[in-house]
Image (cartoon, grey):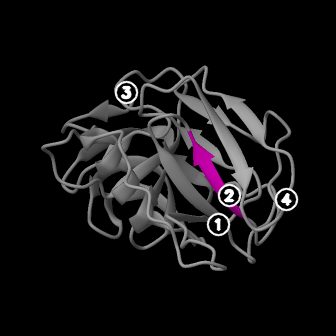
Amino acid sequence: MGLVLIAATATNAAAAEPAALVESVHEDRDDIRFLDYLDVGTELELAEDESVRLAYFVSCRNETITGGQVIIGEHQSQVSNGDIEVEYVDCDGVAVVLDTSQSQETATVVFRKPPDGELPAPDRVIYDTSPLIKSESPVDRIVIRRLDQSVPDRIVSLDAAVVDLRDRDIVLAIGGLYEFSSPSKRLLVKVSTLAQAGSPSAISRLIVY
């Protein structure tokens, strides 16, 4: 028996904010996919030898669940007749949820100039040096510009729904502040001083654009 999705998984503009993110699922599944959002109350049924990896936005809790029945909660899953492994990671999950809501409502962002000599506050903090970009806007490319130092801009083609900058050998500086921009949208991203390269957790480096 495969993984069966019992309740709806994807959110929309009118739905509640998502609670969890699918970080890993069997590639043959077509009911839930990598980086899908899961609402509170979503139910999953897993075969005995089937696993799914989830990350919770608010608690930064990673769960690898094998077999059994799973009910999505606000901060963690309720698992029956299955095995679960838990790990807590650094993440800015609440900001990811806000990014998700804003991308579904509008692609227009109001630019607020900070006082002279001050850097603007970031919209997102990531904990890996190579972001994972989930594109939810009608944008075909973005410009990545470092704001705290003068270095050449990078132009990134958003030629897929998910673009992993790790696969493109793009590494951002630890502690750096970056602007991710297109003609219709601007997102400020801070690479945490705690960031490390090669984080296995998507939620630690996810940017919803």
2 vs 202, nearest the viewer = 202
- Res 150 label: 4
In whole angstroms, how far apart are the C-alphas of marks 1 and 4? 16 Å
- Res 1 label: 3
Magenta segment, which residues?
Answer: 177-181
Q: Identify the image quadrant of the N terminus.
A: top left
In whole angstroms, how far apart are the C-alphas of marks 4 and 3? 55 Å
Q: Of the residues tagged 1 and 3, which is closer to the observer?
A: 1
> From the viewer's perspective, is 41 left or right of 69?
left
For residue 179: magenta? yes
Determine whether the residue tagged by mark 4 lies in a helix, strand or loop.
loop
Q: Amino acid at mark 3?
A: Met
- Res 190 label: 1
Determine the residue positioned at 56% across, 51% down: 206
> From the viewer's perspective, is 6 left or right of 146?
left
Give the mark nearer the N terminus: 1 vs 3.
Answer: 3
Q: Residue beneath label 2, please? A: 178
Judged by its main secondary structure, the magenta piece is strand
Determine the residue positioned at 56% across, 71% down: 120
Determine the residue positioned at 60% across, 26% down: 158
Q: Of the residues tagged 4 and 3, which is closer to the observer?
A: 4
- Check the image and name the residue furthest to the front: 116
In whole angstroms, how far apart are the C-alphas of marks 2 and 4? 11 Å
